[in-house]
Amino acid sequence: MTEGPRVLIAAEHASARFGGEAALPLHYFRVLRRRGVPVWLLTHARTRDELAQLYPGDERIHYIEDSAWHRAMWRIGKHLPDAISYATTGFLSRLSTQLAQRRLARRLVREHGITVVHQPMPVSPREPSMLHGLGAPVLIGPMNGGMDYPPAFRRQRGVFERALIGFGRASATLLNRLMPGKRRAAALLVANRRTREALPAGVCTEVVELVENGVDLSVWRAPEAGAARSGDAATTFVYMGRLVDWKAVDLLLRAFAQARSGAQPMRLWILGDGSERSRLEALAQELGIAGADASAIGSVFFAGWLAQSECAERLRDADCLVLPSLLECGGAVVLEAMSMAKPVIATAWGGPLDYLDPSCGVLVPPDSRDAIIAGFASAMIAMASSEPVRRRLGAEGLRKVRHEFDWELKVDRVLALYGDAIVRAGGPCAPSAPLQEPSGPLR
């Protein structure tokens, strides 16, 4: 009988609290650990408190401690716009973490007989990796990126930000030669064709498509069939995510201001925090839609940051998820809403297109600011007008998640890929032929 894999998950962060791509390594570790697969986790010490609460005393979790360099990059980066900070000080900080991880990973591979290393993040297809030469094959991904704003919103980025992204795009091939993790990987995992086309020239040719996100159905549980929702007859829309400019929550507020003037009672909950929160709260006041509490009809309530379990409770009590994002490569919140049998209204761009179709939600074309506002307002009115439509769309979304996006199914596929990599562990992948440089930004 062939012995199963012994796995090391290596990532900058492994955190449900941080959300986004930081949750991916934690999900792999969680599911593999529960299945009894020998698995180790290597991550930054920023997540130590959270992981210690989840897995007290687990000696298979190892941390890279904060350094003076990390702290300096954080202090500089907090004064920069999010996208610029991610691509500059954030990038330098991540490289520092990976250098430390590389040294520790080599030791862990030797000491514990680890047979495969998995680096799930960062999910940028162009960002280089320092994890190579570890004594075990390395899988990187699933990556997801290679996208830009919709054509009507290309000027959303400032001149400096566009120049920086252009430089990152142009330098990606060189950086991946200097830091050859993606050239020497056993396999590269990509979420979609867009991301495959965004890979730099000369990287590993073993490229496998695997969806980036999945759903933990033990957390995001659908209400029992026929269960009555507590509260009044008003339709509750909910946004979950960071409050940053590319999420376009300002357009959602304007759409809600239009939609609530119709005959159907409704409310909007904003779950999340970020650099745009004060500006968005001021806009809600200006539009006359700011609410004092979550129960106010015809109003927007800013709940701030909530733990994952609290978000799940809020979503269970809501009727529909709304996601107006203009640069959403992934969109895990879409799958989380679908897993709770909630319909979704989202911008028809990027990640939501990988999950949604007319059977389980509404996709609003991002043709212009006015088009998004009008499209979301119209869809919200339609959702508020028909509970049977909401139930039908929600039921189809739940069916789709259970058949395609359950984390258990995703880990089944990843285990097979681990096995393939171990079998091929005789050497690194050969470099590919040069690829045409795509037009998307470095994510």
Image: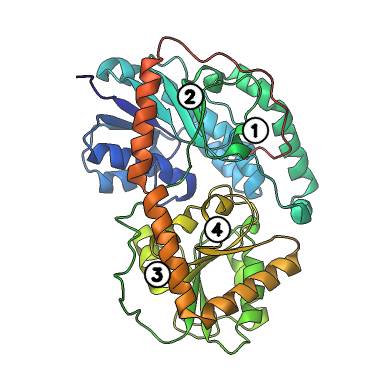
**Residue 177 image point, x, y percent:** 62, 17
Which residue is labeled 4 in the image?
A: 357
Q: Are marks 3 and 2 in contact (CB under 8 Å)?
A: no
Task: Identify the residue at the far top of this view.
Answer: 426
Q: Is residue 156 above or below residue 372?
A: above
Describe the element under mark 3 as helix, strand or loop.
Answer: helix
Q: Residues within 10 Å of mark 3 (few under 14, many from 20)?
A: some
Identify residue for label 3: 314
**Which of labels 1 and 3 is toward the front?**
1
Q: How far is the residue under mark 4 from the one under mark 2?
A: 30 Å
Q: Find the distance from the CA under tag 1 to the CA under tag 2.
A: 15 Å
**Pointers 4 and 2 in contact (C-beta within 8 Å):** no
Q: Which residue is mark 1?
A: 197
Marks 4/1: CA–CA distance: 23 Å
Q: Earlier in the sequence, mark 4 or mark 3?
A: 3
User: Earlier along the polypeptide chain: callout 4 or callout 2?
Assistant: 2
Q: Which of marks 2 and 3 precedes in the sequence?
A: 2
Near mark 4 (Cα within 10 A), the count class, few <14, some 14-19 or many ≥20, is: some
| In contact (CB < 8 Å): disc 4 and disc 3 | no
Identify which residue, 307 or 410, lies in the foreground.
410
Residue receiving disc 2: 187
Label 2, residues with CA under 10 Å away: few <14, some 14-19, many ≥20:
many
Nearer the N terminus, badge 1 or badge 3?
A: 1
